[in-house]
Amino acid sequence: MYNIIETLLIIVSILIIIAVLMQPTKQQDALNALSGGGGDLFSNQKKRGFEAFMVKVTYVLLVLFFVFSIVLVYLSSH
């Protein structure tokens, strides 16, 4: 059981890395943060389409990662 959960944790970890790398870049936001430019009134728009889907996938993978991690800690202590 421990080996199965450990394998699933590794798979989820790799999928999190892929999901984060697939998300669109926010170069303009990073440029404003580095240059000290004031935030635009309309810069915080709702995510749509592929970006919204990738954010949801990342959240689900993160929850799975933490659940598998807690289960592994529990199994290793017994």
Image (cartoon, rainbow, N blue to C red):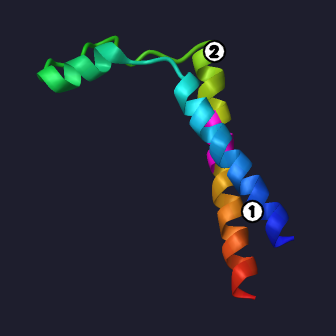
Side of 28 where 36 appears, left or right: left
Query: Callout 1: helix, strand or loop?
Result: helix
Q: For mark 2, what is the residue?
A: 50
**Amino acid under label 2?**
Phe
Q: SS of the residue at dot 2?
A: helix
Q: Locate residue 59, reporting x and y percent.
A: 62, 40
Percent coordinates x, y for residue 67 in the rendering: 69, 60
Q: Is residue 78 left or right of residue 26?
A: right
| Residue of label 1 | 6
The magenta stretch is 58-62
Placement of 74 over or under 19, stated as above or below: below
Position in image of residue 40 (x %, y %)? 25, 13
At a point 69% along the width and 52% down the height, the residue shown is 10
> Residue 50: horizontal and vertical position, in percent?
63, 15
Q: Is residue 49 magenta?
A: no
Residue drawn at (30%, 19%) of the image: 29
Count all numbered tags in the image, as a single digit. Answer: 2
Q: Quadrant of the C terminus?
A: bottom right
Identify residue type, mark 1: Glu
- Marked residue nearer the N-terminal end (1 or 2): 1
